[in-house]
Amino acid sequence: MGPVVEKKPRKKVIPASLVYEEMDGQPIYRKGYQAVLAGKETLEGIVGRSVFQTIVTSAVVGLLMRYLPEHFVVGEAGVHLSPGNDLVNNLAVYNKKDVRDPLSTGYFDIPPKLVIELDSKVDAEHFTTEADYMHLKMAKLLAFGVPRVIWITTQSRKLMIAEPGKDWIVADWNREVALLEGLRLNLEELLKAEGLL
């Protein structure tokens, strides 16, 4: 009888569809990915947004579309910061004139004029807290050249506003904040005006 060879446990392969972003070469998984791997949830069940999140996003997009000049584009956008750093922005505003290849099927490789994030869609297991993930993502976007990042949280109804070289601000939804030159947002007033609050 030969020596007993212990089998190493197989490392579970996580499908690419469960990866939301990549930061510093580390995959950042979608919130709920472990439930999908365990067969307790479907990918479709963890990808979507809640009714309220969708309403908030729609109101902000509507405001941007009403007041931005037509040479701007607004949408969910992937941005390639550097090798190993591919982020997803809930709302990114780009000037079409800055886009080198409008037919590209890849991520943007230039900084947007504005990024607006809504809550968090990631499993923050690689971070001490979900706030640490949010802060790191915002810092990376600012370092890439984004002039303003705004993070909206629906549960606490707060805004986090970050600009390069300035102290970051945490404010209530009723505070008016600059989006782009000449365009400001008071999220509470916007939602009330649309009959949503």
Image (cartoon, helix red, strand yellow):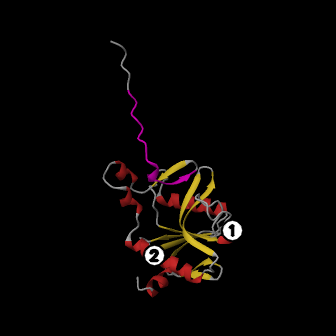
Residue farthest bottom in this picture:
193
Residue under the image location 47 percent in, 57 percent down: 129
Residue under the image location 68 percent in, 64 percent down: 100
Give the number of the disc on residue 187: none
Q: Which residues are magenta?
A: 7-23
- Mark 2 lies on a secondary structure that is helix
Residue under the image location 44 percent in, 85 percent down: 194
Q: Amino acid at mark 1?
A: Asp
User: Viewed as shown, does residue 146 lie left or right of 159?
Assistant: right
Residue under numbered circle 1 = 98
Is 3 situated above or below 111? above
Residue under numbered circle 2 = 56
**Residue 26 screen position, x and y as percent:** 53, 48
Residue farthest left in this picture:
40
**Residue 105 screen position, x and y as percent:** 58, 59
* Magenta span contains residue 18: yes
Q: Amino acid at mark 2?
A: Val
Label 1 neighbourhood size at 10 Å, few (<14), some (14-19), many (20+)? few
Label 2 neighbourhood size at 10 Å, few (<14), some (14-19), many (20+)? many
Q: Is residue 175 visible?
A: no
Q: Is residue 78 visible?
A: yes
- Counting residues from the start of the chain, the first of labels 2 and 1 encountered is 2
